Image: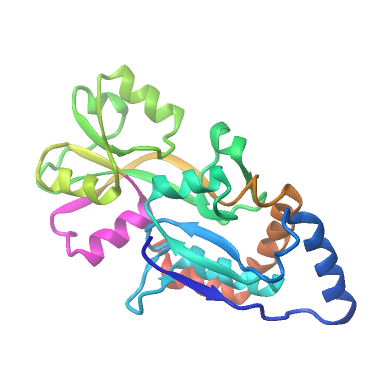
Amino acid sequence: MIIYRLHKLQPAYSGFKQAALLLVLCTVFHSPSWAQAPMDILVDEWPPYHYLNKNNQVSGFASDVFSAVMGEMGIPFTLTLEPFDSVLSKVKEGKVHGSFLAAEDENRRSFAYFSNEVLYESEWVLLSRKSQGTPIKKYSDLAGLSIGVVKNYIYSPDFLAGTKANNVLLMRNASDSLNYQMLFMGKVKYITGEKDNSLWYLKRNNLQDNIQVVPEFVIARNPLYFIWSKKRSSQAFADRFAMFLKDFKKTPKFKELLKSYMAR
């Protein structure tokens, strides 16, 4: 565990609206003590979506959106940073109320409720050393080469099928940072990455002159969601959160955060 911050309840409603919100929340939480204790939210280090800023707090596009939406809902929460594997296991075990951001698959659906409102659609790409200079247009251009991937990340069926059909060796590493190290040292020819995260990483680590996003080759486009543990929350709460998220995405503040954090 790296850090957490406590977001205190800021009443955003009054009169009938606040009473109605309290009634709804009482029906969706499993524990009657929800009003006294903040919701526990766990995320991994994945800039520009969520990361540790210079003030030693979790910041980023998704975390700022989450804070705004929870503020509108009047719900306090703690936000903690841990490795990705730990995040998913604790959501599954009900040790935390929820997490973000997550791509959807059948396994994750078995232990988590997904907000039915997408925050953002991410692009997954390949990265290479600039010295390679070999254009990639199709999976057959990767035949017999090696690609660094991250364990427990969800990769598209097309990517898995395309690499398998062309005898591409997938080197599974524990994190994106290890992937970059493998690529920089020449132990793999390519690595996979989420485009905005990759551009952020290259800029912050002054690697733009050494590593590049392979142009015109998108592995997949994945919707990214907020998720909620089935052992700590409910589909009704996930749906209500999605309603507030949908409304927030229409505001100037959301557009400001999008412009501030995201490369595209």
Residue 1 relative to residue 61: left or right = left
Write the start and end of the magenta stretch as one range. 193-212
Q: Nearer the viewer, residue 175 or 34?
A: 34
Q: Is residue 242 left or right of residue 121?
A: right
Residue 247 spot, x, y in % from top left: 70, 66
Whether the magenta-drawn stretch holds residue 195 is answered as: yes
**Residue at the image position 72 percent from the left and 48 percent from the top:** 235
Q: Please report the residue visible at 17 percent of the width from the left and 64 percent of the height from the top.
A: 206
Q: Is residue 259 magenta?
A: no
Q: Is residue 19 above or below residue 173?
A: below
Give residue 237's position: percent from left, percent from top. 73, 55
Q: Is residue 223 left or right of residue 177?
A: right
Query: Considering the image in quadrants, where does the C terminus appear?
Result: bottom left
Image position of 107 with respect to 95: above or below: above
Q: Residue at x 54, y 60 (%)?
A: 41
Q: What is the x, y in percent for residue 197?
A: 35, 56
